[in-house]
Image (cartoon, helix red, strand yellow):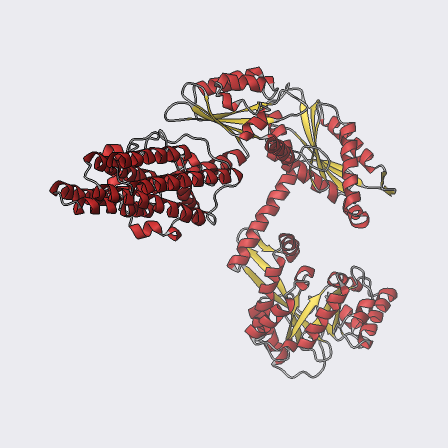
Amino acid sequence: MLSLLIPWADLEYWGKKQRPGNDVPSERLHPRQVRLRRQMTSAVRMQLVDEKKQGNREELPPSIYAALVDSLFQNFTATLAGTFCTTIVAVMTALKTGNHMIWPCAIWISIVGVARAMQMREYELERRVSPLTPERAPWWENNYKNLADLYASSLGLWCFVVVLGSDDAIAHMLCTAVTIGYTAASAGRNYARPWIIQRHIVFSCAPLALALILHGDVYYTGLGLLLALFFVGLKYINLSLNAIFVDALTSSMREAALATRFDTALNNMPHGLCMFTSDGHLAVMNHRFGEMMDLPADLAHLRPSASGILAACVDAGSISEANANMILAEIENPQAKGIITTDPDVARGRSLSWAFQPMADGGAVVLLEDVTERRNAEARITHLARYDELTGLPNRVNFRDEIGHLLANPHGSDEMSALLFIDLDQFKQVNDTLGHPCGDQLLCAVADRLRAMLRPEDFVARFGGDEFVVFQQNIHSPDEAAALARRVVDHLSERYKIDNHLVEIGASIGIAMTSGVGADTLLKNADMALYRAKADGRGTFCFFREEMAQTVEARRILELDLRRALANEEFELFYQPLVNLQSGKISTCEALLRWNHPLRGTVSPADIIPVAEDMGMIVDLGRWILRKACLECMQWPEAVSVAVNFSPQQFHQRDLLSEVRYALDVSGLPPRRLEIEITESSLLRNTQLTHELLSQLRELGVRISLDDFGTGYSSLSYLHSFPLQKVKIDRSFLEGIDTDRPLRLLRGVARLSADLGMSVVVEGIETNEQLELVNADGTVSEAQGYLFSRPVPAMRVRQLLDASHGRRADGEIIPSRSIA
């Protein structure tokens, strides 16, 4: 009997067309020809759904609840036919028994059955207009429940009347069979809402079982009890079916959502995708592939072969036939690799990247990407990496590679090559005065002139800034390189018209001839020759000579030694006294740098300072001198000061004031005992900031001295504009001092400085005659020179200071005797 009640336990997967507007496809709610993917064992493992829980629609997602209600209103024709058959059986029992009370039951069954059929018809008509919504579903569920309850009650009443109102066994069999069949069919039909079938069992089967028990016959009573047990079992079968159905529905909806997301992702990815089965036929193609290949929209539905797809691509003009054959070979023998094809349409100029990935079960996945922009960008980047963007000339990297290749493959033994390193003179002034746009136009004009005067086999590049390089090939003597250099200098020195401005610049050229050296050495040699050409006055050219390399190497070694000397404190300070001409005592000692090199011996400051300035070491070196001098000055008599020379770079550093304070704090030296000597070049840069800095140093208590006055610009405005306290007149004023004019000039400068309230020092005093002439009018307050002492080490200067300040001065100076 169970097999009759649940005839669809082994079903095929649903395949009906979805009704319009429904959130869940109706073919997934009403399985016909469905094969459940889960075996009955999985259904047995499911937890039975509680009656109350199944009846509570709030615990189900709204879409699933609406789908469950939708499943109740199916098969209008079957419902109407069932009502007709049941009515006929009821009429038959009335005729067979002759019981007139059965006729009203038969009539009522037919009325309620037709009402149920019409209700389903009305539902179907409404569904055609709009889908069933979760909000509308409760109303339809209640209507269905009301008529179903009436119909079940009609059957129960009919059975009760037939069994107790007659003794006709055939009538009893007919009503019992119809009611049991209806209940079993309802259990299978109404699996979506178990609480409804449970009411059916109560309203239809309970009266039947009660009537059988009340009949009095022992067999009737036994059948009534068995029917009660059967109905209880039917209830749980219905609940189990409901659990299976809800789980299957939920899984199918989840799979449908996943499939939708996959389809959305597949058709919205920027790449084209095709998947081919092991037999070479199309399995999947996204929209992007069709768009990129200009394929017909319905081609994918025909499930063509890979060759058919590629033939369509060739017909559309998206790929060439040769590329199609190459792609087909990759699909038929897939390996994880990729190829790039170019568009047959040159005007479109499209580049496509094809990536192939074999699948484990055979077949291949083809990923298509339009890499036109990427390849254009890569080409652009490659061009920028090897060519100058402004002039279009090869850049340093490109030039280095090219001449490296040319040098590695030399021509005949009688042929030579030359490298010309060109630097534009006065280009910075053009940039500063006319602006960078004009400077860029000028560089382009220079590049055009260079191209015009070179042979096809020559090679020109821009190295950056205002530097150009020419590689001249196939020459037979250096004279040809010199002739080219002369032409370059002449042509580049001609006027340029840039934005209605007439511009004149020059060029300096360093030339290096190839002599079995590499590209880097050749460039370095030409650069050294250029340096010499610029030192010789610019606007000319110079050939590289070996002594230039020796000079550069010596300079490099000196730089390395300087760094090591500063790190190891190999420097030493010497001190040269300044003598007060009135008291005859040493008033100040100037700190002078000395370097005792282990191999070079004593290195002159004239060799150290320029190199240190070029290396950027002068600030660190000056910091060391300042601190060392302040510490040494603390060992001297209280009346003696120390003078420290500051280079322009050191003087204009941002933290100069902090460095001076730190040196004074660490040493404990009073600020009044420190003199900072600066040159006129320090006053030329940013006079406003220089004036503020000098004022701050003076407020600190430090004395400021103008060193080497009389050299350089020798502007008297410095004496007026800046807060100076001492002027040191350069030794050049002593030349020819025994004549009237130089002596008047020196005394005039000294008198002017003294009238402005500044002390006056004359440097370079070497003879008594010079001292007498300088001190004759009393305007010079201090003197310095070999007459008094040469620069001496710290220990020696302490002895001089003890000798100078350890005796009473009578005010008389004996110039013929050196303090040293």
Residue 604 shows in the view: yes
**The furthest residue to the left:** 218
Residue at image x 86%, y 68%? 744
Residue at image x 66%, y 76%? 700
Residue at image x 34%, y 43%? 151
Q: Nearer the viewer, residue 45 or 244?
A: 244
Q: Nearer the viewer, residue 499 or 381?
A: 381
Q: Is residue 181 left or right of residue 555?
A: left
- Residue 670, picture quadrant: bottom right
Residue 727: x and y in percent read 76, 70
- Whether 601 is drawn above or below 200: the answer is below
Residue 105: x and y in percent read 32, 42
Residue 366: x and y in percent read 48, 26
Q: Quadrant of the N terminus?
A: top left
Q: Nearer the viewer, residue 34 or 203?
A: 203
Q: Quadrant of the C terminus?
A: bottom right
- Residue 155, picture quadrant: top left
Residue 39 shows in the view: no
- Whether 408 is drawn above or below 793: the answer is above
Q: Nearer the viewer, residue 762 or 646?
A: 646
- Whether 533 is drawn above or below 296: the answer is below
